[in-house]
Amino acid sequence: MNDVIKDVMKIGIAGIGTVKTPQKIRTAGLGSCVGVVLFDSSRQIGGMVHIMLPDSSIAKGDNFNEGKFADTGVKLLQILLAKEGARSLAAKLAGGAQMFQFSGGGDLMRIGPRNVEAVKHELAKLGIPILSEDTGGSCGRTIEFDPMNGELQVKTATRGISVI
């Protein structure tokens, strides 16, 4: 569910949305999840998807949420932005942390890094360049994007606020 409060659209986990200036768009709770921002700076339009998992092939049931997965969420966001008039897209990424240390478990337990890899793979397939990223590490993030200036504000408990 997405709420617009004071011109800031809030994107929930596995959520997706688009905004135009003067609106901004925000998501919180990015641990192993990845916040993907796509935007067209010349048209001052942008969108965000809160990716939880790398691959939709594990999806079960009738309530399929495209925004939950890297392979479907990035493409859907591109389509939504094109419908809003975006033409030349670029990307910014944040999240993909390894929130917990596991002994054993192998690749399955590397959810954050796998999410980042899957998002980058999808962006490459779509020909969308990544302008900046704040990914990996072990801390959670909250991000807010402003399509007017293309700035992505990244907040963490350990490093404070940065702009990428």
Image (tube, rainbow, N blue to C red):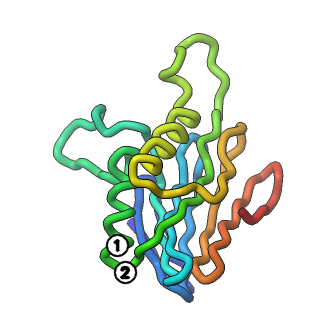
Tell me the CA gap for discs 2 and 1: 5 Å
Q: Position of residue 6 (x, y in %)?
A: 56, 86
Q: Position of residue 142 (x, y in %)?
A: 64, 59
Q: Position of residue 14 (x, y in %)?
A: 41, 53
SS at badge 2: loop
In this image, 37 relative to 86: left or right? right
* Residue kind at label 2, given as amino acid type: Gly
* Residue kind at label 1, given as amino acid type: Ala
State whether residue 15 is above or below residue 118.
Answer: below
Identity of the residue drawn at 38% across and 72% down: 81
SS at badge 1: helix
Identity of the residue drawn at 59% across and 59% down: 92
Q: Nearer the viewer, residue 96 or 13?
A: 96
Residue identified by numbered label 1: 82
State whether residue 109 is above or below residue 53.
Answer: above
Identity of the residue drawn at 62% across and 19% down: 102
State whether residue 107 is above or below residue 82.
Answer: above
**Dot 2, crowdedness within 10 Å: few (<14), some or many (≥20)?**
few
Q: Are marks 2 and 1 in contact (CB under 8 Å)?
A: yes
Identity of the residue drawn at 81% across and 49% down: 158
In this image, 51 relative to 112: left or right? left
Residue identified by numbered label 2: 85
Q: Nearer the viewer, residue 78 or 5?
A: 78
Residue 82 placement: quadrant: bottom left
